[in-house]
Image (cartoon, grey):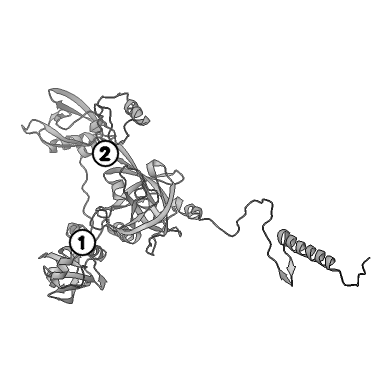
Amino acid sequence: MTDKNSEPSASNTNRIRSRALLGTALALVLGAGVVGGAVLPTQTPAFAEAVQVQGVQPISFADVVDKVRPAVVSVRVKSAAREDVASEDGEFPGFDIPEGSPMEKFFKQFRDPRGNGPGRERRGTGPSMSLGSGFIISEDGYVVTNDHVVKEGKTMTVILDDGTEYNAKVIGVDEKTDLALLKVEADRKFTYVKFAEDNVRVGDWVVAVGNPFGLGGTVTAGIVSANGRQIGAGPYDDFIQIDAAVNRGNSGGPAFNFRGEVIGINTAIFSPSGGNVGIAFAIPAHMAERVIADLKDHGSVVRGWLGVQIQPVTQDIADSLRLTDDSGALVTESQAIGPAAKAGIKTGDTILAINGEAVKGPRELALLIADIEPGTSVKVTYWRDGKKSDMDVKLGTLPDQQEQASAEQPLPQIEPSALEDFGMSIAPADDNAGVVITDVDPNGQAAERGLQPGDVILSVGDTTVTDPAAVEKKMADAKAGGLKAVLLRVQSGEQTRFIALSFARA
């Protein structure tokens, strides 16, 4: 027997050491142990557990979308009727159906709801409908969209995210930047969004909301791919390129940042097939905000005018002019009546800066001048005879907008004639026998009654007519006399017939 107080034998000592080492190993495997007062790290359990990640929040656009979606609208535009013709092989304009696809047979068989089958010609006479996107920028119902969305539209309907529809009217359009401003007439306050004040950077997140293919309230996301893109859309190209999915119907819709501010208006896509390929272009907010403000205040955009024709400076030109680099805009003509010529800018000068802001090329000069109010004096830095100089130039108004922009009072409204109410235009016949119909609105009452350009009105009521004034007078007399309709005797080719036009529908 071994005394507890006696010194252990060598064999006992080895056994004790083995047990101690085993205990330490078990402590490392099963949990934290203490060695010399230090806590050993806890190891992964040998048995399986569900993975749990704490403290990591995935990117979500839900909060942004919840706030902005009530301000994003669909824009339905009704345009004048246009003619669609089905060809002999069954193809139909407006549809890009791949050959051999399952939809090809469908469209060939059912393209015409009135039963016209493949190979038969059909001419559409009804009004055309198109859909786009837009967004509300004020509580009283001003709506921003693209000019090409509402172009040639006769009636506009704005549809909110909840399906509520309102009639809208066009306040103004700007073809050069493809922007349009509408106004919804409603006795309520609308949820609206505002333009971003900060410039976007390449790599920033962007959320696009719109009405692609008629699917209103669609949200896509991506990043800003590039700034300052030129795509040949107009003289003021300065697009933001984004890779969020943008398709037909997204035109006029907003692109938002993470604060729910509009950084751009989606206006174009690059697509060989017509569908999204991740390259979309948006009008930047800083440009759109000024254009929209002008449309709201004036109904048109007032742009500054320098009065020069310009071209880029190549390296060869820079060398010949002793310029240090190939930046600037070379004046090829200083128009005699323009502000620049009056101030002393000459052909052959190179414009280097406006108000101290460098001009890289013709596009930058056009953007800078267009963004300044007419009548403002600007400092033009230019290069002439091997040296740099400054000159003050008082900007004019872009000539093609001069009369409209400078008018203090709106032009008087011309009351439409009775015939315009009926949807047709008339002129004296060549042989002075009657009045010829020169134009017919396909959506008007005259078209519904079968009248066509070339038809000749021989009499109104019981009176023979030989000039447009007589036709208008007889129609006005009939309406003033309490008649609900006026009777016309009309010659169409070799056939003569009577047609009644209703005043109630005029």
Q: Looking at the picture, how far across and down is residue 174, in whole percent?
A: 26, 54
Q: Which numbered disc, 1 or 2, marks the residue that appears first in the sequence?
A: 2
Q: Give the residue at the far right of this rendering.
A: 1
From this view, report whether residue 2 is shown above or below residue 262: below
Q: Can you tell which mark lies on residue 406? A: 1
The disc labelled 2 sits on which kind of residue?
Ala
**Residue type, label 1:** Ser
Give left or right: position of 61 versus 286.
right
Q: Residue at x 27, y 58 (%)?
A: 298
- Residue 349 visible? The answer is no
The quadrant where residue 140 appears: bottom left
Residue 367: image location, x then y, percent: 25, 63
Depth check: give the residue in front, 5 or 69: 5
- Pointer 2 residue: 80
The quadrant in which residue 496 appears is top left
User: Considering the image in quadrants, where does the C terminus appear?
Assistant: top left
Tally of numbered tags: 2
Residue furthest front in the image: 10
Q: Which residue occupies the foreground of this view, 114 or 438?
A: 114
Mark 1 vs mark 2: in front: 2
Q: Quadrant of the N terminus?
A: bottom right
Checking the image for residue 106, the label placed there is none
Q: How far across and down, in percent of the image, does residue 104 sit? A: 33, 30
Number of other residues with Cα within 10 Å of mark 2, as a class: few under 14, some 14 to 19, many 20 or more = some
Q: Nearer the viewer, residue 462 or 141?
A: 141
Mark 1 to mark 2: distance in Å? 32 Å
**Secondary structure under the numbered disc 2 in the rendered image:** loop
Question: Callout 1: few (<14), some (14-19), or many (20+) C-alpha neighbours within 10 Å?
Answer: few
